[in-house]
Amino acid sequence: MLNIAVRAARKAGSIINRAALGGEGLKVKAKQANDFVTQVDQAAEEAIIGIVRHAYPDHGFHAEESGRTSGDAEYVWIIDPLDGTTNFIHGFPQYCVSIGVQQRGALAHAVVYDPVKNELFTASKGRGAFLNDRRIRASKCLRLSDALVGTGIPFREVAHVDRYLVQLKAIMQGASGVRRAGAAALDLAYVACGRLDAFWELGLSPWDMAAGALLIQEAGGLVGDLKGEGDYLERGEIAAATPKVFPQLLEALR
């Protein structure tokens, strides 16, 4: 199943790379304020679903562009065909394909693929996390004061902004540095491989978080909502960090 996810992610990545090289003019539509979709998002998602459906016709999907078609399927594929669409539109090279697979509601497999750098992050429950077939681990950072922390600025729901700005101030005062790159799935993969020591964001969708969350867990990090609970996919908010930094991050956000 992970091999099918990898094949689907690479196919989507090739579609994205072709478009980035200028093979076609981008048609950009606004789904809502500051939330965009292009024909590349749609083509990449269709390619992923086509590959998965051919291999597993009875599996369900929860995808950004086509919605939920899972029914009572045991396996559900949670898909973001192009996380970081706004970056992609502007030629800012920080975006990825994100595919998570749930079995009976629990995350089982994960792929995050960066087509710009050709970096493939993969994980399966209980089998560790990998970057281009090399085992990865969360960093050994022990203190928030030493941590490089990733974040995402709320863009879909303005209601989150005031709460977020208070959190941002607390983390800026308490951490070594803060970075905002604009693709949550890739930021989470960076926590898994130690490039970031922690990450938090509000106002996300399940496809932004599912694959990255499993990568972090399999790399020895911790993931939760902003109270540290496990219902982050439902709540639409996530905090993630190394084991020692995680409680310090939650306390600072609180």
Image (spheres, grey):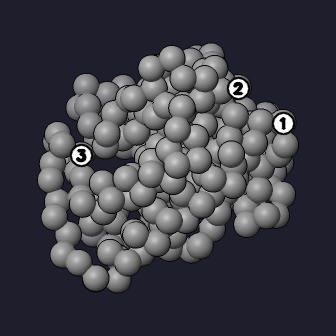
- Amino acid type shown at disc 2: Pro
Nearer to the camera, 209 or 13:
13
**Residue drawn at (73%, 61%), measured in percent from left and top?**
131
Instruction: Work out whether mark 1 precedes mark 3 in sequence or the reverse, and give the earlier one.
Output: 3
**Which part of the image, by quadrant, shows the N terminus?**
top right
Instruction: Work out whether mark 3 precedes mark 2 in sequence or the reverse, and give the earlier one.
Output: 3
- Amino acid type shown at disc 1: Gly
Q: Position of residue 210 (x, y in %)?
A: 56, 36
**Residue drawn at (48%, 59%), measured in percent from left and top?**
96
Per the image, the residue denoted by label 2 is 247
Q: Is residue 196 above or below residue 156?
A: below
* Quadrant in the rendering for residue 199: top right
Instruction: Work out whether mark 1 precedes mark 2 in sequence or the reverse, and give the earlier one.
Output: 1
Q: Is residue 241 above or below residue 102?
A: below
Q: Is residue 187 visible?
A: no
Determine whether label 3 and label 2 are within 8 Å by CB: no
Q: Position of residue 170 (x, y in %)?
A: 50, 34
Per the image, the residue denoted by label 1 is 126
Per the image, the residue denoted by label 3 is 35
- Circle 1 or circle 2, nearest the eye: 1
In the image, 21: left or right of 213? left
- Amino acid type shown at disc 3: Asp
* Quadrant in the rendering for residue 38: bottom left
Q: Marks 1/3: CA distance?
A: 35 Å
- Circle 2 SS class: helix
